[in-house]
Amino acid sequence: MTDLTDLEQKSLNEIPHPALAEGSSIYGGTKVFPDYKAEEGQSYFTLVHGIAHESSVSFVAVLQATRALRKGFEAAIYFYGPGSLNCLATRGFPTTGTSAFPGEHNINNSLKTFMAEGGKVYCCRFGLSLHGAREEDLIEGVIPTHPLDVQDALIHYARKGAIINSTYQL
């Protein structure tokens, strides 16, 4: 270890680190609400307007939609604006598909899982164009949409009585 001053060493030794061993529980595990499952014909629709890796908003939205799908809901995710960047298959460095840091492909992998399990993913073409992204760079299976579809998709799922989760981050 680097040479420490007496005050640095004193500060370091005031509280033992880590105070708890790895694996220690510091939170309770009681689930407050029932574990709801979808009723016949129910839908779950998520709008995502958040940039990949700039916050957890986009990734958590995908995880929530996947959980809804697994509970039996017909589930769809609609990425628009900067959220469209979440749908790019060209993520990676120094080559596409190579993770430059752990978790770089979390969203890609989670979207692939979501679609493989029956979820639909939509991506706004205008959102792609705002950032110079190309439609051919979309993850396989992502459905490109017209800019006017954002509002009509929302109306479509609202008329179906869907649970609608709208995330927004910038």
Image (spheres, grey):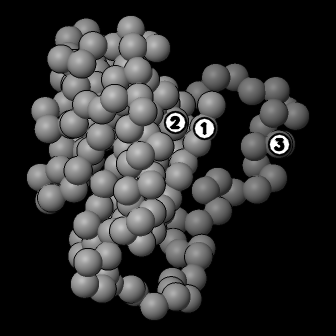
153 vs 19, left or right, is left
Residue 50 numbered tag: 2
State left or right for residue 107 relative to residue 169.
Answer: left
Q: Nearer the viewer, residue 150 or 83?
A: 150
Q: Where 22 falls versus 92 (above or below)?
A: below
What is the C-alpha distance between the residues marked 1 and 3? 38 Å
Q: Earlier in the sequence, mark 1 or mark 3?
A: 3
Residue at numbered disc 3: 11
Q: Determine the CA span between mark 3 and mark 2.
A: 40 Å
In the image, farthest residue toward the right: 7
Identify the residue at image location x=39%, y=14%. 129
Q: Which three-letter amino acid code belongs to the residue tagged 1?
A: Gln
Where does the image place residue 130, in percent across and percent down from the top left? 46, 14
Of the residues tagged 1 and 3, which is closer to the observer?
1
Residue 6 visible in the displayed image: yes
Is residue 64 at least partly visible in the picture? no
CB-based contact (under 8 Å), mark 2 and mark 1: yes
Question: Who's the residue at 19% across and 30% down the image?
Answer: 139
Of callouts 3 and 2, the N-terminal one = 3
Report the amino acid beneath label 3.
Answer: Ser
Q: Earlier in the sequence, mark 2 or mark 1?
A: 2
As drawn, the label of residue 138 is none
Which quadrant is the C terminus positioned in? top right
Residue denoted by label 1: 169
